[in-house]
Image: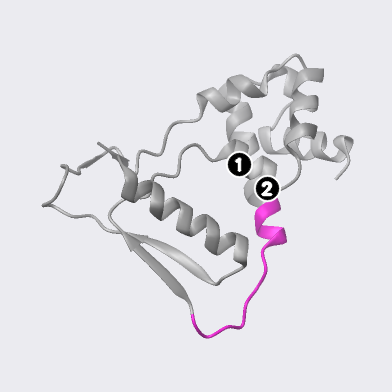
């Protein structure tokens, strides 16, 4: 995808010119852009079987940079933002940590999901909300605490 087209899509997602966007607006715009591009590129499957990985935690880390890299647009987005005197690093820093785990099992679960995607397997991760275990899990304002 050419930078001009990418710039237009990002400005459309943000609702204004990139130069006048705040970091939160750029973050929201980049999320909308990556979701739209991922949805367009998604493979449909007629497979009847589906693999589920069930875990109490998924330690995914921040996702924006990884999604930009996987879509092949990281360098273009960085250049577009720099042309408007904006920093992709600031947007990446703004992204909150999903905090869906705290240890090795969460990291392992994330690696399994990444492997499923890389291998093109039809699969999903299923998170468990449990009340007894290694740590206390609560949700407030739609965020895990």
Residue visible at 61% across and 41% down? 66
Q: Which mark is residue 70?
A: 2
Q: Which residues are magenta?
A: 37-49
**Where residue 19 sits in the image (x, y, percent)?**
74, 18
Q: Quarter holding the C terminus?
A: top left
Above or below 126: residue 4: above
Name the residue rendered at 68%, 42% in the picture: 69
Q: Position of residue 64 (x, y in %)?
A: 58, 38
Q: Main SS type for the magenta part?
A: loop
Tag 2–tag 1 contact (CB < 8 Å)? yes
Q: Which residue is labeled 1 in the image?
A: 66
* Circle 2 crowding by C-alpha within 10 Å: few under 14, some 14–19, many from 20: few
The answer for how far apart the CA atoms under marks 2 and 1 are is 6 Å
Q: Residue at the far left: name it.
A: 132
Determine if the magenta segment contains residue 38. yes
Bin the neighbour count of mark 1 within 10 Å (Cα to Cα): few under 14, some 14-19, many 20 and up. few
Q: Where is residue 85, by image quadrant?
A: top right
> Quadrant location of residue 53?
bottom left
As helix, strand or loop, the secondary structure at mark 2 comes to helix
């Amino acid at each position: 995808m050419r930078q001009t087209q990418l710039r237009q899509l990002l400005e459309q997602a943000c609702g204004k010119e990139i130069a006048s966007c705040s970091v939160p607006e750029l973050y929201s715009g980049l999320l909308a852009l990556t979701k739209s591009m991922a949805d367009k590129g998604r493979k449909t499957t007629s497979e009847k079987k589906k693999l589920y990985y069930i875990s109490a935690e998924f330690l995914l880390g921040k996702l924006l940079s990884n999604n930009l890299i996987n879509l092949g647009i990281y360098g273009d987005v960085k250049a577009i933002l720099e042309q408007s005197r904006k920093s992709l690093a600031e947007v990446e820093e703004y992204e909150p940590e999903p905090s869906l785990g705290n240890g090795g099992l969460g990291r392992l679960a994330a690696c399994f999901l990444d492997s499923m995607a890389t291998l093109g397997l039809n699969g999903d991760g299923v998170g468990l909300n449990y009340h007894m275990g290694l740590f206390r899990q609560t949700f407030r304002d739609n965020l895990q605490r």
